[in-house]
């Protein structure tokens, strides 16, 4: 379908979603959005998102591009999407996009956040679905040491799911930093890169948390960056603590939500 270039900024709770990307017989972010758009437009509307979040992963500013007939004013479309989408998906904004804008292809970087709970209250039903309820202390100095080698361009096959067929596995990381949460609740990790491999952030958090608990040497992070498989990596952190924060579009400033 040809139409007017449009983009939306979505927020969603990933707990009951099998990720963003369309899949048969399961709920996904893309599936829910395209189902509502088809209901409104009368035919399938193909959507393209900045990041393909996995099952259980949340999003705070997922940019999605698509085309709709000109009769759909952004204000009216926003109102309709908010009324028809399920409660775990929220549309924060709908705007006209520059002609040919592609939320995935034109993004120059993506940013993720991972939340770790170190106190007993992290197991509360009001926190457990939205963070890693670790419930154990972490050494902040070891977290900082473990994240330092991630900056720059590296091959991240050692920190990604097996079985990916890609031209290359190199990613350029521009931000990788931990900060403490207030009240001794735990830590937040934020990472930004030009691209991410499947489960990459969760593998990285898994090994850094192990290092900060004294379960393996900090130097293992640098060592696994040189390996071509994940056999020596720590288990990936659970999806509940991971959030897609947004993408950068330097050539389309009005779309950038970072």
Image: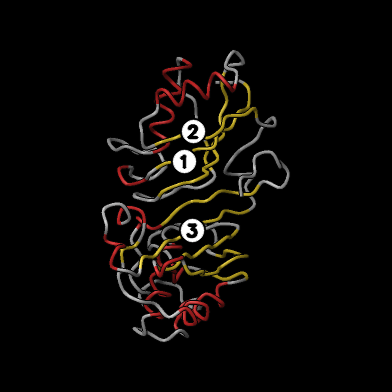
Of 84 and 151, which appears nearest the observer? 84
**Distance from the alpha carbon under mark 3 to that under mark 2:** 20 Å
In the figure, residue 160 lies in which quadrant?
Answer: bottom left
The residue depicted at 45 percent of the width and 57 percent of the height is 165
Q: Which residue is mark 1?
A: 11
Q: Which residue is mark 2?
A: 91
Q: Earlier in the sequence, mark 3 or mark 2?
A: 2
In the figure, residue 99 lies in which quadrant?
Answer: top right
- Coloring scheme used: secondary structure
Residue 140 falls left or right of residue 69: left
68 vs 27: above or below: above
Q: Secondary structure at mark 1?
A: strand
Residue sticking out furthest to the right: 251
Residue 48 falls left or right of residue 187: right
Number of residues whose C-alpha sits closer than 10 Å to that of mark 1, classed few (under 14), some (14–19) or many (20 or more): many
Callout 1 touching callout 2 (CB < 8 Å): yes
Number of residues whose C-alpha sits closer than 10 Å to that of mark 3, classed few (under 14), some (14–19) or many (20 or more): many
Q: Which residue is mark 3?
A: 113
Q: Position of residue 120 (x, y in %)?
A: 28, 67
The residue depicted at 33 percent of the width and 55 percent of the height is 127
Q: Secondary structure at mark 2?
A: strand
Q: Position of residue 188 (x, y in %)?
A: 47, 64
Q: Position of residue 192 (x, y in %)?
A: 57, 60
Residue 99 falls left or right of residue 213: right
Q: How many marks?
A: 3
Q: Secondary structure at mark 3?
A: strand
Q: Which mark is residue 50?
A: none
């Amino acid at each position: 379908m040809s139409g007017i270039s449009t983009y939306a900024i979505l927020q969603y709770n990933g707990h009951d979603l099998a990720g963003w990307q369309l899949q048969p017989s399961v709920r996904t972010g893309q599936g829910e959005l395209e189902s509502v758009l088809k209901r409104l437009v009368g035919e399938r509307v193909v959507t393209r998102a900045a990041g393909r979040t996995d099952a259980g992963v949340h999003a705070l500013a997922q940019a999605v591009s698509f085309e709709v007939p000109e009769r759909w004013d952004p204000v009216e479309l926003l109102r309709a999407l908010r009324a028809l989408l399920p409660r775990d998906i929220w549309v924060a904004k709908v705007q006209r996009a520059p002609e040919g804008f592609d939320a995935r292809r034109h993004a120059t970087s993506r940013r993720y956040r991972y939340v770790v709970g170190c106190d007993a209250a992290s197991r509360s039903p009001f926190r457990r679905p939205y963070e890693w309820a670790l419930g154990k202390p972490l050494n902040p100095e070891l977290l900082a040491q473990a994240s330092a080698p991630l900056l720059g361009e590296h091959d991240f096959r050692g920190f990604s799911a097996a079985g990916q067929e890609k031209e290359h596995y190199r990613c350029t990381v521009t931000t990788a930093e931990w900060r403490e949460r207030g009240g001794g609740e735990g830590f937040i990790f934020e990472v930004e890169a030009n691209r991410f491999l499947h489960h990459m952030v969760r593998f990285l958090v898994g090994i850094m948390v192990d290092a900060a608990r004294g379960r393996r040497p900090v130097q293992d992070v640098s060592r696994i960056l040189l390996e071509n498989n994940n056999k020596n990596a720590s288990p990936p952190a659970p999806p509940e603590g991971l959030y897609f924060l947004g993408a950068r579009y330097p050539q389309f400033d009005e779309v950038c939500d970072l």
